[in-house]
Amino acid sequence: MASLPSVAITGTLRLGNELKKHPSATEKTPNISYQRSSINTQLDVNFEPFKPLEFHEALSLVKEGEQVESSYYVPLLQHCIDRVSVPETEMVHAHVIKTGTHKEFFVMSFLVNVYAKCGVMVNARKVFDNLPRRNVVVWTTLMTGYVQNSQPELAVEIFGDMLESGSFPSNFTLSIALNACSSLESITLGKQFHAFIIKYRISHNSSIGNALCSLYSKFGSLDSSVKAFRETGEKDVISWTTIISACGDNGRAGMGLRLFIEMLFENVEPNDFTLTSVLSLCSTIHSSDLGMQVHSLSTKLGHESNLRVTNSLVYLYLKCGCIDEAKNLFNRMEYKNLITWNAMIAGHAQAMDLAKDNFSALQSGTEALGMYLKLNRSGRKPDLFTLSSILTVCSRLAALEQGEQIHAQTIKSGFLSDSIGYELLENMEVIDDEEEEAEEKTFSSAGVVGVLTYGILLEDNSAGTSKRENAKSDVSCSMLESMLYGFRGIRSVEIFRVCHRDMHFMEDEEWG
């Protein structure tokens, strides 16, 4: 990557040497303050919506190289954005040049936006460089494109060029610059931009306030984040959501919940992002009571069927040990995505830690394994989080064989390299050896008669399981539960094999 230029901005901002070597690989969408881009809004000229016939007629004329009114280019280019179609954008661009419309500033500035949204920043920069003049909107458009396409250092460079050209940034421009600082992971540069805002007495509207709040939160400075929030003039739902999320990210769940209550008293209606953040706080403090109140509120606000909210609720209930509530909610969901399944699997894995006894932990673990089987049968492919969660469950159950089968499946499917699950499998082997040693010590202290008695009863009753005789299976499980209290060294994997043999976890085709 080319080194960053040293940029001095009116004696206030300077891109330091440490950032000149900063890698440009950042998140694809680093818009950390939940704020949607308002570039399209700034470029809007209130065109009337086109009827389908008129739109397709204009598209046909462009393809044929015929002359069209300049006003038709905007919906055509918006169509290119919606489809993320570079070839169609280039076709319209060529037509604009051919018909002489490239002299119209608005059409060409909108092309900068289209190329940026399509991820072709080279073309966006070429169009930008050939503009006869540049206003703050087009400067901001180019900066936004660089941030959204993982080139935040170039966004900072463009900001410096803008000031040197005599253009003064808008509040939205500064919010984009602050987001660039977050992507660069430079709190120093972010503070310089903040100083620039203070120096020129730029009012904290929601866009600047939200960006500052997110910036300071990302670097663990929650006090500065709260201060930026308090100094924000008109706080919208994004402002409240940003600060509530910041509290959660910095381990201050109580403060986040108090801010949520304050938000409600200010008559600001929470959206699905807000509710998701609050439910995350409830999960952090293991408060099912508060979670249920938020659940009720989300229903009243019409978010009951919102997938983001329901996924958070499922995880909350599972983490708080409310298994039945989680299952009921899961079963009522009309649509489940991979996040839903992951929430159920991870939630059951979490429930293992919260279980009152070993047998309850076993039940939660086998529920997680059952969910993984259902996920496979549904046709959805697991992701890294799914596989990590289920391998962790296998590790806790000391289910080495199941873990090896799942790990083999992930390698076969090309999801993970062989090294990903190696550590978990190694842990399972260690646990397996330790439990064997503990079992030997426990059984030796219990006496030969006691061990043989339990073994005979276990084999006698578990034989019925293979024949789907549920009554006998229940007896085996009851015996095993009592064994947990009598013999603490018994291996969880043995209980798992007997009580859940009817689930065929040991058959390879179930995991394939």
Image (tube, grey):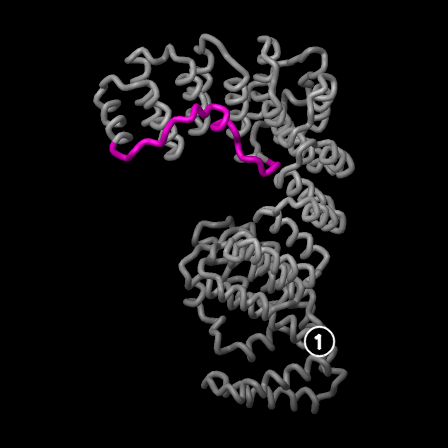
For badge 1, the amino acid type reads Gly
| In this view, 252 is above or below 370 | above
> Residue at left 62%, top 24%?
171
Residue 116 is situated, as x and y percent measured from the top left of the image, at: 46, 25
Residue 473 is one of the magenta-drawn residues: no
Can see residue 296?
Answer: yes
Residue 126 is situated, as x and y percent measured from the top left of the image, at: 43, 15
| In this view, 338 is above or below 173 | below
Q: Which residue is mark 1?
A: 489
Q: Quadrant of residue 216?
A: top right
Q: Secondary structure at mark 1?
A: loop
Residues drawn in magenta: 32-53
Q: Considering the image in quadrants, where does the C terminus appear? A: bottom left
Residue 69 is situated, as x and y percent measured from the top left of the image, at: 30, 19
Residue 158 is situated, as x and y percent measured from the top left of the image, at: 57, 17
> Residue at left 49%, top 71%?
505
86 vs 56, left or right, is right
